Image: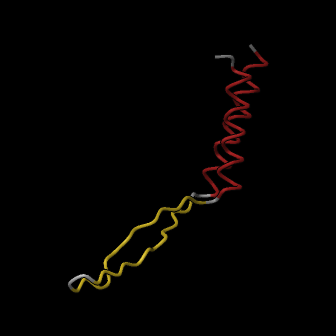
């Protein structure tokens, strides 16, 4: 793959990580389970990305772009 394309892809991924901020998932737990009566609770969990990680990916993309132009 061309270094220019790789650099732009890394920059785009870094921006997405910075903008998006976190990903979430849901879990379901049973609250009441008595005979035919069932009640459950959905809980949403958020796992944050490090903002530093997005910056590092962007800097890596810029470095790849610069190294591609020197070649």
Give me the residue at 35% from left, 81% from top: 39
Q: Position of residue 38 (x, y in %)?
A: 30, 80
> Image check: 23 left or right of 9?
left
Which quadrant is the C terminus positioned in?
Answer: top right
Displayed quadrant of residue 48: bottom right
Displayed quadrant of residue 34: bottom left
Q: Position of residue 30 (x, y in %)?
A: 31, 78
Foreground of the two, 4 or 62? 4
Foreground of the two, 16 or 58? 16
Name the residue at the right extreme. Answer: 69
Give me the residue at 66% from left, 41% from top: 13
Foreground of the two, 14 or 30? 30
Q: Position of residue 12 (x, y in %)?
A: 71, 39
Give me the residue at 69% from left, 54% from top: 18
Which quadrant is the N terminus positioned in?
Answer: top right
Q: Is residue 37 above or below residue 60?
A: below
> Image check: 57 left or right of 69?
left
Name the residue at the left extreme. Answer: 35
Q: Is residue 57 above or below residue 5?
A: below
> Image check: 54 left or right of 48?
right
Q: Position of residue 60 (x, y in %)?
A: 66, 36
């Amino acid at each position: 793959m061309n270094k220019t394309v790789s650099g732009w892809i890394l920059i785009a991924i870094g921006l997405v990580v910075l903008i998006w901020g976190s990903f979430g998932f849901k879990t379901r737990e049973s609250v009441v389970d008595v005979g035919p009566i069932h009640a459950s609770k959905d809980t949403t969990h958020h796992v944050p990305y490090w903002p530093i990680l997005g910056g590092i990916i962007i800097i890596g993309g810029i470095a790849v772009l610069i190294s591609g132009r020197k070649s």
